[in-house]
Image (cartoon, grey):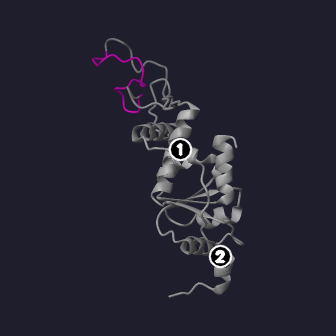
Amino acid sequence: MKKTSTKIKEAVTVKSVKIDLPKDIFEVPMNTNLVHQVVTTQSANRRQVIAHAKTRAEVSGGGIKPWKQKGTGRARHGSNRSPIWIGGGVTHGPLKDRIWKKRLPKNIKNKALFMVLSDKAKNGWLVIAEELKMTEPKTVQAKELLKNIGITESCLVALGKMDKNLILGMRNIPKTGTIQAKDLNCLDIVQYKYLLTDKEGVEIIKKTFLGE
């Protein structure tokens, strides 16, 4: 078994700390119906419309009548773009102009965010470090960082500031994601068991969502 070098361990030394968290964010009672509403709305807003079937106006083909109306003994046809022809348009197929977007008030989205943050804190799934920092964009360093904190399951890392080394190091670890603390949202948080941030990240959360 390959051992982690002392150099790597020193580069990612990190410890969790206990700090006073604002009650307005981290002690909000859970309302599962509200959280579900926000999660489904955010999922719909991220949905991309890909499936599209061409109508008779979009398929290639001539505008000329295939054969004359009478006298051939065959059924009458006006265009080979007709849906009953091979290569013709599709009737009632999926179209790319469908709109899945939904809107929710900002205060509702923030309230749901506070609920899931409170749930993480209540269950011990919120981990706050003194500082999150990596000297190199190495996956092995990122794994060692999570190991030192004691996180062995899916984890979302909320960064107080942009850290390219940490982002690049985390992206190859399964079930691990990174996000800026100012961009935290209900949907991203519920997809992971643990939420990892640092003291600066907590301050950014307070400033962004409480205006402090």
Question: Residue 150: within the magenta?
Answer: no
Please state the extent of the stretch shown in magenta in the rendering. Answer: 72-89
Q: Residue at x 38, y 26 (%)?
A: 92
Q: Position of residue 144 (x, y in %)?
A: 58, 75
Q: Are marks 1 and 2 in contact (CB under 8 Å)?
A: no
Question: Residue 83: within the magenta?
Answer: yes
Q: Nearer the viewer, residue 52 or 136?
A: 136
Q: Position of residue 149 (x, y in %)?
A: 56, 71
Which image quadrant for residue 139? Answer: bottom right
Pointer 1 or 2: first along the chain? 2
Q: Which mark is residue 113?
A: 1
Q: Which mark is residue 13?
A: 2
Q: Is 100 situated above or below 66?
A: below
Amino acid type, mark 2: Thr
Q: Position of residue 54 (x, y in %)?
A: 46, 30
Q: Position of residue 108 (x, y in %)?
A: 53, 34
Q: Residue at x 42, y 32 (%)?
A: 94
